[in-house]
Amino acid sequence: MGSAKLTLDDREYELPTVVGTEDEVGIDISRLRGQSRLITLDNGYANTGSCQSSITFIDGERGILRYRGYPIEQIAEHASFSEVCYLLLEGDLPDQAEKERFDHELTYHSMLHEDMKKFFEGYPPTAHPMVILSSMVASLSSYYPSANKEDKLRLNMSRLLAKAITIAAFSYKKSIGQPFMYPQNRLSYTGRFLDMMFSVPAEEYTVNPVLEDALNLLLILHADHEQNCSTSTVRMVGSSGANLYASIAAGICALWGPLHGGANQKVIEQLSMIHEAGGGYRKFVDKAKDKNDDFRLMGFGHRVYKNFDPRARILKKAADAVLEDLGVDDPLLEIAKNLEQVALEDEYFVERRLYPNVDFYSGIIYSAMGIPTNMFTVMFALGRLPGWLAHWKEMRSDRATRINRPRQIYTGATERSWVPLADR
Ligand code: ACO
């Protein structure tokens, strides 16, 4: 691949290109400013590569998603979430011994320091679990100051994966006023989480394998998605040298927004609103198309998928199967399918290539599993955690990493003289 040429007025600048393993081509503008004082402007970084990465490949035009080269469809069919964590963090699938060692790490670091239980007491019962999750994750850095030591990275990453489900379940128990249930080592990763969420001291609780499998699938499908808003945040915060826990806490906050991970909660709220309004979804499609109305169809559209989101395809199928297995009849699933049909045939959505994204069906499955709506984004965070960790690790080990510091085009006042208070 040759270089690119940029001509401005009568000057020409030669810009090298970078080619990825899937033949994606990037124009390297990193030296442009040094040569010319020019910068590039790209609101929302829609066409800007911030790094080179070997973790996840997405081709949004063709609806392709691969973790470390493995198609998401194969991973969804065969993998356990812990295998996916290992794959993302280490670059390859674990063999039997590696898998056992890793599962052991994810099991035996799952308890929180007892003092941390007091932190939960300080929140009002109405606190959103995302705020609790982000603050608890940041707080872990005070217990594990070794977080950034190279020889302790694997330990701290396993620690965080192991403890995240405990924090999430404790935040739920806190919100409903029930006692915290401690992690059970005999259970799988997803089984342990469900047990901490739904068991109570007074009764025997057996983890339903249907729920365990459904959760495994949901976590896997959310595990990584290259340079999205939260992952880029993790890399950006980490680029300053901030510790692992602080960087991940920042990613959790970025995920919380309704245009990102918060969309799954909004989807269910929107579907419920349509249901309560009598199910007339056409009215809501028209509302979403109205440029004078801020209303958007939540769970539709994606920055990179201009074909179908492959994760949404898998989840749509799973939603049918899980609800049937659990014997749940949720009118919202029918509304979601009808809404999808109407939107997919509508010129506005077709023209803009707006398809259901991963969040469109995930909430319906979470609801059927008994997970409350305000926990949906926490569930997304639990799934995305290995992706954030893998990117943080990659960012740290990449010699090309510099502190992330974009430029801007200044549009404010030009120089003016200070006006004393009495003269204003
Ligand atoms: N409903 C109605 N119109 C939409 C929607 C939607 N859900 N999404 C995009 N559009 C329209 C925009 O109004 C815009 O129209 P225009 O060209 O006439 O101005 C066009 O489609 C392009 O949309 P942008 O907002 O420019 O696309 P962008 O790539 O910046 O945003 C985003 C992507 C944030 C996902 C957007 O589609 C959206 O807000 N969707 C709803 C929220 C959602 O589901 N978020 C979850 C994303 S997936 C994830 O984070 C896991």
Image: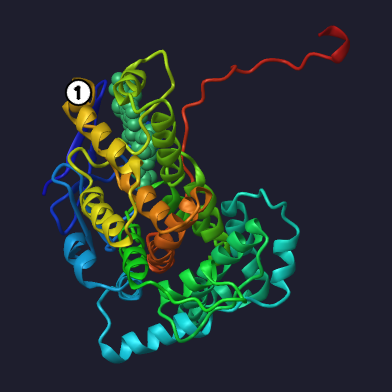
Amino acid, disc 1: Asp
Task: Determine whether 297 is above or below 422 in the image.
Answer: below
Tell me residue 33's x, y (percent).
38, 38
Write down which quadrant ligand 1 falls in: top left
Q: Quadrant of residue 114?
A: bottom right
Tell me residue 58's x, y (percent).
22, 52
Tell me residue 79's x, y (percent).
25, 72
- Residue 201 vs residue 59, the one in the foreground: 201
Image point (51%, 46%), residue name? 256
Image point (20%, 44%), residue name? 60
Image point (33%, 61%), residue name? 326
Task: Determine whether 74 is above or below 355 in the image.
Answer: below
Would you name the residue on which mark 1 appears?
A: 346
Tell me residue 362's x, y (percent).
35, 51
- Residue 8 vs residue 222, the one in the foreground: 222
* In this rendering, position of residue 341 left or right of residue 228: left
Q: Quadrant of residue 216?
A: bottom left
Q: Is residue 203 visible?
A: yes
- Residue 305 vs residue 231, the one in the foreground: 305
Neighbour tally class for label 1: few under 14, some 14-19, many 20 plus, Cα within 10 Å: some
> Which residue ends up furthest to the left in the rendered image?
1
Q: Quadrant of the C terminus?
A: top right
* In this rendering, position of residue 140 left or right of residue 295: right
Q: Is residue 164 visible?
A: no
Secondary structure under tag 1 reads loop
* In this rendering, position of residue 412 left or right of residue 308: right
Image point (19%, 56%), residue name? 20
